[in-house]
Image: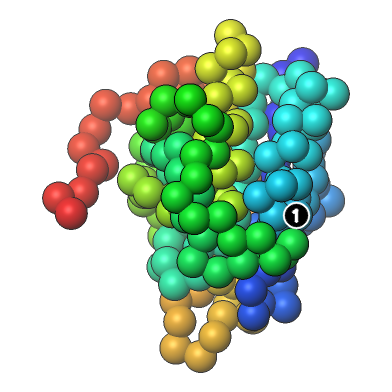
Amino acid sequence: MTTVLLTGFEPFAADPTNPSGDAVRLVAGGWDGAAHLVTDVLPVTFAGAAVRLEELIERHCPDIVISTGLAGGRDAVTPERVAINLQDARIPDNDGAQPVDLPCVPGGPAALFSSLPVKAIARDVSAGGIPARVSLSAGSYVCNHVFYVAAQGAASRPGTRAGFIHVPWDTAHAPEGQPAVPLADIAAALHVAIATTLATPHDLSAPAGSIH
Ligand code: PCA
């Protein structure tokens, strides 16, 4: 049976909750899909998050790794296409660490692509009435770091596909006036992302880029 590893993050910065971790817990609680699902909620720390993800990959040998995190201010669920080999933290992480202009992996490629079908995921999530689009930057904070390390791990394990999905604030916890999506819809989008990845060995070839 196919094994899927799905992760979210704990809260960070000023937020009391993190919809990525909360949605992952919802998906785990209601899981009846056609794959073995392993879930975890990662610390928002440069030192801990990717190490924990690598331990989970070693232990469970997943065929598919989908990590998720909060991108507060975005108005859509955004499968990320590109991880960059850069840590440039605008704010300290939950350990108080604030790396600036360091590589995620010294000597690694400047960038790595997701091996998830990001365009098909965005299409299928949108078709369910939940806003979604492909993103070309996961930033340079802990999410990008985890995405980069997961993508590098997948590249060295033939048959493993890995990528990252940023989610908006959930409606119950978004700051006043900020875009948000109900937590149940974020969880539904992650369900769709898993189902689409299982069903789609090769991504769509359809325009999903941006001019700027
Ligand atoms: N979002 C942050 C880190 C943890 C999270 O949920 C990010 O986008 O890097």
Residue located 72% across and 78% down the image: 16
Report if residue 149 is visible in the image. yes
Residue located 38% across and 49% down the image: 137
Q: Secondary structure at mark 1?
A: loop
In this view, 164 is above or below 117:
below
The answer as to whether callout 1 falls within 8 Å of ligand 1 is: no
- Seen from the viewer's position, the closer of residues 119 and 86 is 86
Residue lying farthest left? 211
Residue located 56% across and 55% down the image: 99
Residue with the mark numbered 1: 43
Q: Quadrant of the N terminus?
A: top right
Give x and y (percent) for residue 181: 53, 70
In this view, 68 is above or below 117:
below
- Seen from the viewer's position, the closer of residues 165 and 122 is 165
In this view, 151 is above or below 176:
above
- Seen from the viewer's position, the closer of residues 150 and 97 is 97
Colour scheme of the picture: rainbow
Give x and y (percent) for residue 165: 52, 47
Report if residue 125 is visible in the image. no
- Type of amino acid under label 1: Pro
Left or right of 136? Residue 177 is right
Residue located 66% across and 50% down the image: 46
In this view, 139 is above or below 56:
below
Q: Quadrant of the C terminus?
A: bottom left
Q: How dense is the environment of label 1, judged by Cα within 10 Å: few (below 14), some, or many (20 and up)?
A: many
